[in-house]
């Protein structure tokens, strides 16, 4: 079975770039249960969302670590 440009990202998600946007298929690249097409601007927004969430999680981790150190004094 040929993937023909599809890449398995994990958790049943397959991705393929068509030159304009990103195609995402769920559970199979041949017979998917769900399909999503992300134009470049939407993909960029998704990446920015992930970066924002990662920064927020890091900031919360620093706060939590500081609070734990303060309690243990």
Image (cartoon, rainbow, N blue to C red):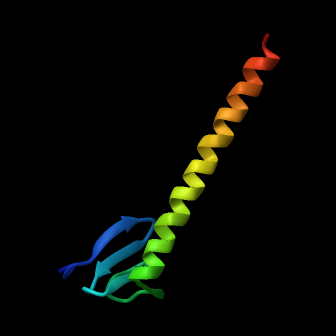
Residue at (55, 65) in percent of width and height = 49
**Residue lying at 52% horizontally and 61% vertically, measured from the top left:** 50
**Splitting the image into 4 quarters, where does residue 38 fall?**
bottom left
Q: How far from the left and from the top, in percent, is residue 59?
A: 64, 41
2 displayed left or right of 13: left
> Taking 1 as reference, is 34 left or right?
right
Up/down of 66 relative to 36, above or below: above
* Left/right of residue 10 with respect to residue 59 in the rendered view: left
- Specify the quadrant that holds the C terminus: top right
At 57% across and 49% down in the image, what residue appears? 55
Spot occupied by residue 19 in the image (x, y as percentages of width and height): 25, 85
Q: Position of residue 72 (x, y in %)?
A: 78, 14
Q: Position of residue 39 (x, y in %)?
A: 41, 86
Q: Residue shown at 65%/33% (left/top)?
A: 62
Asked whether 35 or 32 is in front, the reply is: 35
Counting labels gives 0
For the N terminus, give its image quadrant: bottom left
Residue 11, above or below 71: below
Residue located farthest toward the top when viewing the structure as drawn:
73
In the image, residue 32 sits, relative to residue 65, either above or below, namely below
Residue 24, by quadrant, is: bottom left
């Amino acid at each position: 079975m040929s993937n023909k440009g599809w890449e398995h990202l994990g958790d049943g998600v397959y991705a393929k770039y068509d030159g304009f946007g990103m195609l995402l298929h769920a559970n199979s690249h041949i017979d998917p249960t769900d399909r999503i097409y992300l134009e470049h601007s939407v993909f960029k927004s998704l990446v920015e969302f992930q970066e924002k969430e990662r920064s927020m999680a890091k900031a919360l981790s620093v706060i939590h670590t500081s609070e734990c150190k303060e309690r243990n004094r």
